[in-house]
Amino acid sequence: MSDSQNAETQETQNQEQQPQFALQRIYLKDASFESPKAPEIFRSQWQPEVKLDMNTTHTALSAEEGLYEVVLTLTATVIQNEETSFVVEVHQAGIFLARNLQDAELHHTLGAFCPNLLFPYARETVDSMVTRGSFPALMLAPVNFDALYAQALQRQAEQSAQH
């Protein structure tokens, strides 16, 4: 082999070992809207209490290829006068390529970075469904997924220390 071929082969191997991350696809996996008190709820003064639950999960689609599905679930329950006005739930998903990452980097990427990319899509879907249900848009505030991820790691460490 010539020196230039050796250099090209070495360069190709180095590129293959570099961390790689790419968004492959974003899609709506599931969505539901329920308004059990409609139409009576529209006759009352609108001063709701909003409860937002969030959850993220990830699944290896092909670990050897570095493909993962990440699902961000947002559930908003809106209560008016101690009765549920509506519940909206959105499962926003994405397929991500994440190769050659250290375990800690991979977990952070799947647990914080990917949900951060999915959140604007989930928020828009929630707003759209709520307004189609004839309610004012929720306009969910941005979420700091890095802070949530750090809190989850801290809780896991505390639980491990207790056992």
Image: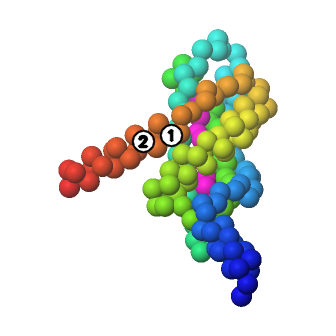
Mark 1 burial class by Cα count in 10 Å: few <14, some 14-19, many 20+? some
Considering only vertical position in the picture, is 9 above or below 128?
Answer: below
Q: Residue 155 at x, y = what percent?
A: 33, 44
Residue 70 belongs to magenta span: yes
Judge from the rendering whether residue 108 lies leftward or rightward of residue 30; answer left or right: left
Q: Which residue is mark 2?
A: 150
Q: Quadrant of residue 23?
A: bottom right
Q: How far is mark 2 from mark 1, CA to CA?
A: 6 Å
The span picked out in magenta is 69-78
Which quadrant does the C terminus fall into? bottom left
Question: Judging from the image, what secondary structure is the residue with disc 2 in?
Answer: helix
Q: Residue 151 at x, y = what percent?
A: 40, 40
Query: In the image, what residue type sits under mark 2?
Result: Ala
The residue sitting at 33% across, 50% down in the picture is 156
Q: Residue 58 at x, y = what percent?
A: 56, 58
The residue sitting at 66% across, 45% down in the picture is 118
Front one among 147 and 59: 147
Question: Judging from the image, what secondary structure is the residue with disc 1 in?
Answer: helix
Front one among 94 and 75: 94
The residue sitting at 76% across, 28% down in the picture is 131
The residue sitting at 51% across, 23% down in the picture is 82
- Which residue sits furthest left? 162
Label annotation for residue 146: 1
- Which residue sits furthest front? 3
Residue 124 belongs to magenta span: no
Query: In the image, what residue type sits under mark 1?
Result: Asp
Q: Are marks 2 and 1 in contact (CB under 8 Å)?
A: yes
Q: Quadrant of residue 33?
A: top right
